[in-house]
Image (cartoon, rainbow, N blue to C red):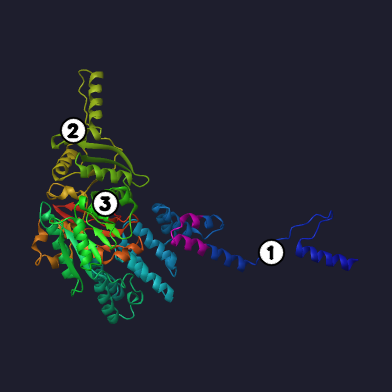
Amino acid sequence: VLTLAVVAGCQSAGDGGQDATGAPVAAAPPVLDPATLAMERARRVQDAWALLDAGDVAGAQAVRDGLAGNGLELLDAGLALGRGDIDAAAETVRSLGASAVTGNLRFALLRADVAAARGDHAAAVAGLIAFDARAASDVLALGRAIWRHGTRVQGYRLADLGSRAGSVAERAWWRFLQTYNEALTPARQRTLWSGWRQGHPDHPAALARPSGLDERGPQRIAVLLPLSGPLANAGERVRDGFLAGYYEAGPPTQSIVFHDTGAAPVDALYEEAMADGADAIVGPLSKENVARMWDLDPILPTVTLNTIATPAAAAGTPRLVQFALAVEDEGRALARRLGVDGRRRILVFRTRADWSERAAVALETNLPDGVELVDTGVFPDVKEVTSVVGEALGIEESQARQTALARLFPGVEVAFTARRRADVHAVVALLDGAHADSLAAALRFHYAAGLPVYGSSQALRDGARGLEGMRVCDMPWRLYPSALKAALQDPFPAMADTAESLFAFGVDAFRIVNRLSWLAGSREHRIMGASGTLGLGPDGLVQREPAWAVVRGGDFQPLLPGRPLR
């Protein structure tokens, strides 16, 4: 009987069995040894990272919620960055300390992503270059990350970092990134990388191949521009920039045919381009003609040189990309910069001009969490600037308090100085040159000369002489030294006139049409252009990130990303 009882007991342990009343008993869960538990936990952490890398923040968070215990700080920082909470991610990276990067590629990549989220891609690259990768897989992952961030660093900055590099390997990275970024086509980049790899066979850059080198680009490009009629001057400047890019790209391998939209309708020119065997189209330039091109629904890859705000355009199409020097790009850039610089409460001053209103809307709708627009002052004309600024700064209320005190104590001399409101951290100037100069004078008059002022490129159109200390966003060609710009000045003297922006626009149109497939492959892909850092959004619009500088002595001093002046 005892033996039978033991056997029955053993059986119940295996299949659950029954209790004394005959009811079934659930089987006990298997007991896993600590090593197995640790492996399972590590696997789930890797699953969370994989989801995060794929952009599935919610899925990664769900996996994280099922994990307990310590050692998850790095994953939490990655999740915070995925949610857009840059400050929380940065604080965790700081708390983990520099020692955490030793041998930990995941930490190095996250630290670089935090720096990039704050706009400092150079710092991201510097940290990655310093990482000592040993495993072949780590070398490849590291190289890909360096290419991703390095292609978003301005040329002048790469040159400076290369001159101050602490090692031969670091110097090689910076100098080759500068040369690579300035190349205008994938063909030129392939040639540069192949030659550089032969001279540096053991360098990490030679082991991690940049993405996009296999793109061949179009062989016959039809460019639709107004070369006669009222828009001819603008069309000629864009044409010159496009040709400058073409000739600077290296030995000609493409056929470029220009079609005059001032002399024939877009429909006819499109059919003509198709008949000529074009495999890509650039243009047209006017909004009216861009709208017509949309209606045609071209089967060829097309880069229009303006944008239209219609439901059809908003939906986007893989074949048709819209590129423009839009003030909305600057409004969005101003919003991002205010957040990175920690300006929590802002005043905006604008005019009634259409571009100023559109920039203000883009700014307000893109303000990051924690940045509040406390008031907007609208200048009817230059004569009203001082009064509008005084009202927005609360000077009239301060003066009203002085009047009230004088009435309370008649005959008593009260020492009083009007004070501006103290809850404003920065001013945004969406103004042309004349209004921007008047704003600077009005801020000094109203005891607000110390407030940081951020301005759009329109403030610089009449020069920067009266804008001392203003932080401005504009195209890199206006603000920074450029080897490409210097190389083009002699053969294209018109580049230096007032239409310089249109020339740069043409250069970038040439870049984009040669990189369309690569840009469409990932929202992280970027081109360092003459008009800004260029990427392609899901709506088919080219996203342009302007450059930043601060006005010093009437000239421009580069303003490093993520490092506000106090």
Q: Answer above or below: position of 205 versus 264.
A: below
315 left or right, relative to 281: right
- Which one is closest to the eye, mark 1 or mark 2? 1
Residue type at mark 2 is: Ser
Any mark on residue 387, and which? 2
Q: Report which quarter residue 483 is drawn in.
A: bottom left
- Front residue of this view, candidates 287 and 165: 287
Q: Residues within 10 Å of mark 3 (few under 14, many from 20)?
A: many
Whether residue 566 is visible, yes or no, is: no
Q: Report which quarter residue 198 is drawn in.
A: bottom left
Residue type at mark 1 is: Pro
Residue farthest to the top, as pictured: 410
Q: Say if the magenta span includes residue 55.
A: yes
Q: Answer above or below: position of 164 versus 366.
A: below
The residue labelled by disc 3 is 329
- Which one is closest to the eye, mark 3 or mark 2? 3
Asked if the residue under mark 2 is in contact with the one under mark 3, i.e. CB atoms within 8 Å, the reply is no
Tell which circle, 1 or 2, labels the residue nearer the N-terminal end.
1
Any mark on residue 30, and which? 1
At x 87%, y 67%, the residue is 4
Asked if the residue under mark 2 is in contact with the one under mark 1, i.e. CB atoms within 8 Å, the reply is no
- Front residue of this view, candidates 529 and 186: 186
Determine the secondary structure under disc 3.
Answer: helix
Range drawn in magenta: 45-61
At x 56%, y 63%, the residue is 41
Residue 361, image x and y in percent?
28, 43
